[in-house]
Image (cartoon, rainbow, N blue to C red):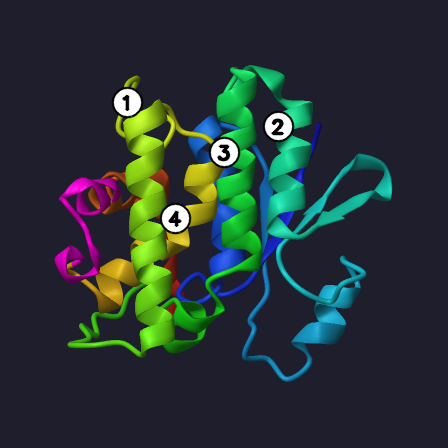
Amino acid sequence: MAYTLVIGNKNTSSWSLRPWVAMKTLGIEFTELDMNLRDPEVKQKILRHSPSGKVPALLLEGGEVVWDSLAILEYLADAHIESALWPPVRGARAHARAVSAEMHSGFQAVRQECPMDFLGRHPRDSLSEASAADVRRIVALWRDCRSKHGEAGPFLFGTFTAVDAMYAPVASRFRTYLPNLVPYGDDGTAQAYVNTILAMPAMQLWEIGAKAQASS
């Protein structure tokens, strides 16, 4: 299967990062098609590839398109069963999907207050109560996943899964804005997980790409 992944700017496009980091980590080959989201004509350019006019989009052989980060991850999980992109045990898999769906549809306050700035470092002394509540919930989610399912490795469900792809941009946001998560209930689990995500080779490759775009 030949894939093309349509993505936005690496410094700011959190939704693009999710399938990109999953495919890189799992060794699924693809061609990258970059869209400059600051281009005033970018929506028309994206519409040539995706009906949503948004990134990311996964272009398949035969002209089929999968858009939306979570839908792309679900497609990849079906197409590459050997990748174990979801946990193999049914209960853990259901938990992983619920945690991913909560990320997909929630945490609007912290997204707006702390937009992804992958290369930036803008530590905050405080957040609005709505954003702080989002962070506390994320920290609690991570601790729960690690305590129940993390025995096989350093990721939320032990080995790398779609959940980690969904929360990779959050790890970058915490590095940018909240280098100290203790005020939000962290017992060290969340910070260790942030460090795990940021140390991934795929995340480091994304950072190299973001720097290259920033200097061009």
Image coordinates for residue 193, horizontal then vertical, percent: 25, 41
> Residue 179 is drawn in which quadrant?
bottom left
Front residue (pair 79, 130): 130
Viewer-nearest of discs 1 and 3? 3
**Looking at the image, do the residues carrying marks 1 and 3 touch, with CB atoms under 8 Å apart?**
no
User: Is residue 86 visible from the viewing direction of this image?
Assistant: no
The label number, if any, that marks residue 123 in the structure image: none
Residue designated by label 4? 168
130 is higher (above) or lower (below) than 162: below
Residue, disc 3: 96
Q: Is 88 displayed left or right of 137 in the figure?
A: right
Residue bearing mark 2: 77
Q: How far apart are marks 1 and 4 (CA)?
A: 16 Å
Residue pictured at 73% horizontal, 67% vertical: 53
Tell me: 131 left or right of 112: left
Q: What stretch is highlighted in magenta?
A: 181-193
The answer to whether 29 is drawn above or below residue 117 in the figure is above
| Residue 213 position in % (x across, y down) | 40, 66
Q: Is mark 2 on a helix, strand or loop?
A: helix
In the image, residue 65 sits, relative to residue 27, either above or below, namely below
Rendered location of residue 192, percent (x, y): 18, 41
